[in-house]
Amino acid sequence: MENVKNAETYYTAKEAAEILKINLSTVYQLVREGRLRAARIGKRSIRIPASSFDELLTPKPSPEPAKPPRRIITKIV
């Protein structure tokens, strides 16, 4: 019974869409892109762990912006 106490809550794609206030097709797109973790149940169903909502909504540090290319000034005669 100890496993039951530590079990994570899972939601259907429809429930996740309602919680995140987004369209159901957007939930499936986020899962396909790997931005929202999900577990496949059988051939057609998925379940989304509650912890993946936090991962999706937590801002990630953006990579350092690329430096602009150096301008080479030439004198045209």
Image (spheres, helix red, strand yellow):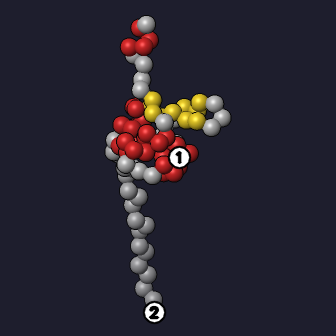
In the rendering, which numbered label is found on residue 77? 2
Q: In this view, does 40 lie above or below 62?
A: above
Contact, CB < 8 Å: mark 2 with mark 1?
no
Image quarter where the C terminus lies is: bottom left
Task: Please name the residue shown 34% across and 41% down the image.
Answer: 58
Query: In the picture provided, is 24 more to the left or to the right than 57?
Result: right
Task: Please name the residue shown 58% across and 36% down the image.
Answer: 45
* Percent of width and height locating residue 40: 58, 33
Q: Distance between the residues labelled 2 and 1?
A: 61 Å
Of tags 2 and 1, which is closer to the observer? 1
Task: Please name the residue shown 45% across and 33% down the image.
Answer: 11
Residue sticking out furthest to the right: 43
Q: In which quarter of the image is residue 17?
A: top left
Q: Quadrant of residue 4?
A: top left
Q: Nearer the viewer, residue 46 or 62?
A: 46
Q: What residue type is labelled 2?
A: Val
Task: Please name the residue shown 36% across and 37% down the image.
Answer: 54
Q: In which quarter of the image is residue 71?
A: bottom left
Query: In the picture provided, is 17 more to the left or to the right than 43?
Result: left
Residue hosting label 1: 28
* Percent of width and height locating residue 53: 39, 38
Q: Residues within 10 Å of mark 1 (few under 14, many from 20)?
A: some
Q: What residue type is labelled 1?
A: Tyr
Asked whether residue 60 is in view, the answer is no
Q: How crowded is mark 2: few (under 14 residues within 10 Å), some or many (20 or more)?
A: few
Residue sticking out furthest to the top: 1
